[in-house]
Amino acid sequence: MELLKIIAIFFIGYYAIKYLFRLLMPFALRKMGERLMRKAQQSAYQTQQGAGGYQQHGNPYDQFKQTNNQRKGEVHVDFIPQEEAKNRKGTQTAGEFVDFEEIK
């Protein structure tokens, strides 16, 4: 009899917690989202104030552009391959081969 009582309490507690989560989670997630939005707006406002108190208009991706300090006609190489990669020829650069038998 005690075992049935323990199992019943377990199931009642499980479904009660499940029901409470279903009721309270949307409220908690909404509050958390509002808090994150408020924090993001405050940091954006502080960034604007730190930039002289005015809003910056234009392309937001300008900060990622690289400055081009080269003169016309100059060549700039970003990547130079290793020497061992240049010396490989034929099957060495083709990858791995797998032997197979043809089944008829």
Image (spheres, rainbow, N blue to C red):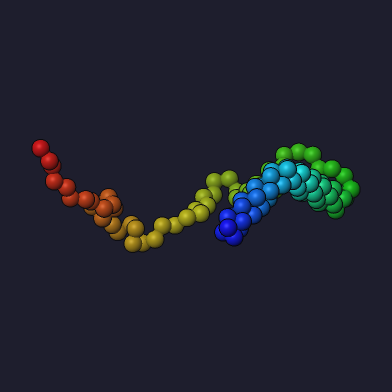
74 relative position to 21: left or right = left
Q: Point out residue 59 in the picture as x, y percentages from the top left corner.
A: 72, 39
Q: Of residues 99 and 73, which is closer to you in this image?
A: 99
- Give the residue furthest to the right: 53
Residue shown at 33% from the left, 62% from the top = 84
Residue shown at 12% from the left, 41% from the top = 103
Q: Point out residue 5 in the picture as x, y percentages from the top left corner.
A: 61, 56
Q: Can you see residue 69?
A: no
Q: Based on the displayed image, in which of its 4 quarters is residue 80 positioned?
A: bottom left
- Give the residue furthest to the front: 1
Q: Of residues 46 and 22, which is closer to you in this image?
A: 22
Residue shown at 61% from the left, 52% from the top = 8
79 relative position to 60: left or right = left
Tell me the quarter of the image containing the N terminus.
bottom right
Residue shown at 18% from the left, 50% from the top = 99
Q: Can you see residue 96?
A: yes
Q: Point out residue 61 in the picture as x, y percentages from the top left corner.
A: 68, 43
